[in-house]
Every structure is written in C-alpha cells, then in structure tokens.
Image (tube, helix red, strand yellow):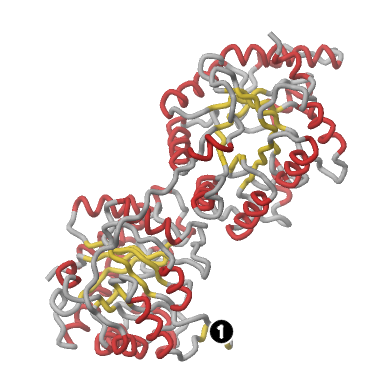
Amino acid sequence: MKIEDYLKRKKIICDGAFGTYFADKYGTGELPERFNRTEPEWMRQIHREYLEAGATLLRTNTFAANRVSLGCDEEGLRANIRAAWENARLAAEECGRVPGTDCFLAGDIGPIPDRIGGTEEELYREYRLAGDALAEAGADILLFETFSQLEDILPVIRDMKRETELFVIVQFCVNQHGYSNAGISAHRLLEEAAQSGMIDAAGFNCGVGPGHLYHILEKMERPENIYLTALPNAGYPKYMEKRKVFSNSEAYFADKMAEIAKLNVAFLGGCCGTTPSFTEKLCEKVDTVPVRKCAALKEAEISERAGRKCGFWQGKNPAQKLIAVELSPPPGADDGKVMKAAFSLKNRKVDVVTFPDSPSGRTRADSIMTAMKVQQEAKLCVMPHICCRDKNAIAMRSQLLGAYVNGIRNILVITGDPVPTLMRQDVKSVFNFDSVGLMKIIHELNQEEFAAEPVVFGGALNQGRPNLEAEIGRVKKKMAQGASFFLTQPVFTQEAADRIREVKERTGSRILCGIMPLVNLRNALFIKNEMAGIDVDDGIIACFDAGMTREEGEQAGVKIAKKVMEMTEDFADGYYFSIPFNRVYLLDGILTE
C-alpha cells in the first residue's frame, strides 16, 4: 500500500524525537547517528518502542547523517545511512509490522551545517548524496525536517521527484510568532511548498510546543493540494547540568495534539522531548479519521501593488529619468552637513534621497534614523539602505517595523561590505542571510504587517562582477522576491555601460545607473584603487591633474558624469548620484542641458 492510499483511511501517527530520547536513554553525549553501525540494537530498540506505542511512521536515524556532522567520507556516509535504514526495517519486522501495509518508513534528512561551505553547488551535492543513499536503501518516502526555508533543498527534491516515485514531506521550524530563522512566515513557507508542485506534505516540527503550534495553524489559510504535518516539541526545555530537560507533560501534549488534528492535519507526531509515552498518549486522544488535502489559498497580493502606491517614481512621467541622490550619514554626532545638503535638494529635481548603511564596514549614523530626520524636517522622499552585515533576523524585523511606523516606504536592500580586516578581532559580522534573504522578510511583511501600504524595495546591481551570468541570476532571484528597482555601481566606462544594458535586456528590470562625479585627482585615484567593484580606467584619471583648482576638478567630474549619462541614455530608467563629500550642488551642472 502506498502512503497516499493509507491516508484515504487514516491519519498518520509519526514517532517522537529520536535524538533527545536517545540522549536520555543511553547518555553517550554523542550524536545517535554515530551508532547506526556500531550499536544497531540500541537503534532498533528505540524504533520498536515507538511502534509499540502506536506510531505508524518511523523516521530513520539519519537527521544528522551528513559528512560534516559525522566527519566521514562519501562511502562512510552511504554505509551509515544503509545501516540506519536496516535498523528501522528490522525493528518493524521484529514488531510484526510490515512497512507499506500497517506502517511506513521515511528517510529523514536534516539541515546540512554551514561548515560544508554553503554554496548552492556544495549544498546540492550533500543533500543529493543523503537522498540518493536513502532511496538506494529502499526509501520511497523522504522527510526533510527542521528547515527555515525551502530554497536549499528544493533543487534536490525537484530532481529526485523527476527521477523516482517519491512521497516528499518537508517540515519547517518556526518560533512562537510563526516565523522561521530566515524570517519567513509559516503561511509563506507552506505556500511555497505547495506552489513548488514537488512536495506532497508540509508542515512544522521543532521550535514550538503544541499550544503555540495550534494557534499558528488555527489562524492560517491552508495551501492547495498538499497534506499538513504537525510535530511540535514536548514543550520548552530547561537546562539542568548542561542538559536539555523537557517537562513530563504527555497528557497536555496529547490534548493539544487532539485539537491540532481537527485542523485538517494528516501527519501528527512529536519532536524534541517527546518519548514513546507521548506517542502512546497521543494515540489515545487523537481521532485518526482521514483528512482531505487542504483547500486553496487566496491569491497573495504581489509587491508591484506597492510600486503603484508608494514607489518613489509615483506620479513621474515614464518618459522622464528618475533621479536618486545619495547623502552620507555623518561619521559623528554633527549632522549639520548632511542636513544642509538635504535642504538644498528641495529645490532640485530629485525623486528620492538615499542613505548608505555604514559603507565599507565603518561606523556612520544609522541610515534609517538619518532618513527619518531628513523626511520629517526637509520633507523629501527618502530611501535608507539596509545591509545584512550587522544584525540577525530578529533585529532586522524589528528595524523594519520601526522604519515602517515612522513612515519609511522605500528601502534599498544590500548584503553589505565586510568588516575591515584590522577590525575583525573586535567586530564580528552577522550575515544571518544575504540580500535575497532580507528581501524575503520584507516580502513577508508586505503581505502581512504592511499589507495596507507595502514597502517598495530594490537591490544593488554589481555590473563589475566577473561572472555576469551569476549577477543576472541574482537580479532574477531578487525580482522573484519583489525587488522593483536596482541601483548600479558607479559607471565610468563603455564596457560597464554595455554590461548593464545586457542585464536590462535579459531581466526587464528597472535600473538606475550609478553616477559618481569625481572632484579631483586624489579622489579619482582613491576610487580607482580603494573601492572594489568600481572600474575607473586610466582615461578617467588623465582628466585630472594635481594642479587643478577645486572648481576645475569639479568641472572635470561634471563633464565625465554627463558623458556617462549619454552612453546609458538609451536604456537607463534613471540615475543614482553618489557625489563625494555631499557636494550636491554639482547636480546643477550635470542635469542642465
């Protein structure tokens, strides 16, 4: 019998936590996966206990079976996974159960640690290795659990589903408020799983207790054509003698799971802290009548709605070029220069004023706070930059909420420059995610907290990246998350302009080309030699000499800027001016005919 046929008759009761139960039972202090081959009876004993308690689905002891966690080579990992599968299969046989008839075995895969390297190719290889090893051992059900987002595993799922008949379950880990560590809401996680067309069941495990999970599921719309799963923790742990200890709350857990079962949930079980006694109580309380796949979600409003309502291009004639001007927040407490520059922009043709977020990893006044002050006092449309270097997902969401309640509706999202080498002993980068990950968070907020008036956000375009294909791929990823415009690095050469033109033609994105009016030879040499990603050729340097007056240097910079605007006129949607030392008066010469 296939699992789909069983689900027409009954709900699936999954086993409980293997890892925490193993730690309590055997106390080795080691990962249980390390004992798949050396202590098979230990493994089979735990599986038997869950089956005898009433479980109809066993997860193989392979959650942490990967080369990083086990410190093994590829063949060693395959042998470990084969042993784990045999342990589960033999345990079922010893209990008189027949997989595919009155119970099911699922090959379990957990997140690969970051230490693998983290590139898309490396992650794909590791997940594919585990998936193939489980399928070769006999698994026709793969269960991916405790993930914060789908993108790392979807390519593997897609390829394996095309090659093999697999039933795929994906479980995400969210907090009490219904958000994963990647800042994605429970609703959005399920929606993405359903829309992939490759996932048969999806839901949640770990992270929360049954009470919080019930409230998350109760208020959610359900995705279409997918089964729901719910495997919460026993509750919340206390730490005693450096060990996690969960309270003995089987009755409460079972009562809450009975409530969850009524929410059209097809797979019910437990995660951290749940033991066979939890499974037994759950079986006593839960009504296992079959469920149908969930009803369709309402179509989510996309962020383009925000562009029509709040974008800095609102009301602008499409034939006119958009003008963005960057003002650098002060490096100290004196905001006189930046505010003077801001007020001078009121009389110039500027659509939005942008504020970098401590560029080059050197402290400046907060970009959002500076933008808010300029918006409130100078009455300009503002757009702070937000980078991923300095804050984790919690702080990012908090920052975005604070910006929103203070009227910020335009944001430039960037990954951010690394901390300078000499500072790294004292200052640590965070990089909880990159710019695409932060865009996902804003996309989530736009659909929920900011639905009445969504934030418009865009990204950076680095035309100087050696692999232009990779940069085009990044632009497409950002657009898929809702990015509605892109600001480029400063342009100085025809080659740079041509590369941006190609990005424009292949993505259809709204692009504001970066314009940096250099002001003297020293400034030009610094940008050429010290600023990564900006190509200043010798022809530009030759336009300056050390004996120029300030006015002569500025006029040379204005001339270069106008030439760049001419070479990008045919494709640029606008221009993004980054003017050294906030000398915004140079715009008068640049923007005149």
Q: Position of residue 71 (x, y in %)?
A: 42, 66
Between residue 423 and residue 551, name the one nearer to us.
Answer: 551
Q: Residue at x 74, y 22 (%)?
A: 348
Between residue 208 and residue 578, name the one nearer to us.
Answer: 208
Tell me where residue 532 sits by quadrant: top right
Q: In the orientation shown, which residue stands out farthest toward the top?
A: 593
Query: Along the horizontal axis of the image, is 73 left or right of 244?
Result: left
Query: Along the horizontal axis of the image, is 240 left or right of 26?
Result: right
Q: Position of residue 505 (x, y in %)?
A: 43, 23
Q: Position of residue 365 (x, y in %)?
A: 78, 45
Q: Which residue is mark 1?
A: 238
Whether residue 76 is visible here, answered yes or no, is no
- The quarter of the rendered structure image containing the C terminus is top right
Image height of 161 relative to 87, above or below? above
- The quarter of the rendered structure image containing the N terminus is bottom left
Image height of 14 relative to 201, above or below? below
Whether residue 459 is visible here, answered yes or no, is yes
Element class at badge 1: strand
Q: Position of residue 319 (x, y in %)?
A: 54, 17
Give the total of numbered labels: 1
Q: Residue at x 55, y 32 (%)?
A: 486
Query: Along the horizontal axis of the image, is 515 left or right of 462?
Result: right
Image height of 528 relative to 133, above or below? above
Tell me where residue 310 sits by quadrant: top right
Image height of 261 relative to 202, above or below? below
Between residue 546 and residue 586, name the one nearer to us.
Answer: 586
Q: Residues within 10 Å of mark 1 (few under 14, many from 20)?
A: few
Kind of residue at disc 1:
Lys
Tell me where residue 12 sits by quadrant: bottom left
Q: Residue at x 36, y 68 (%)?
A: 65
Q: Residue at x 14, y 87 (%)?
A: 96
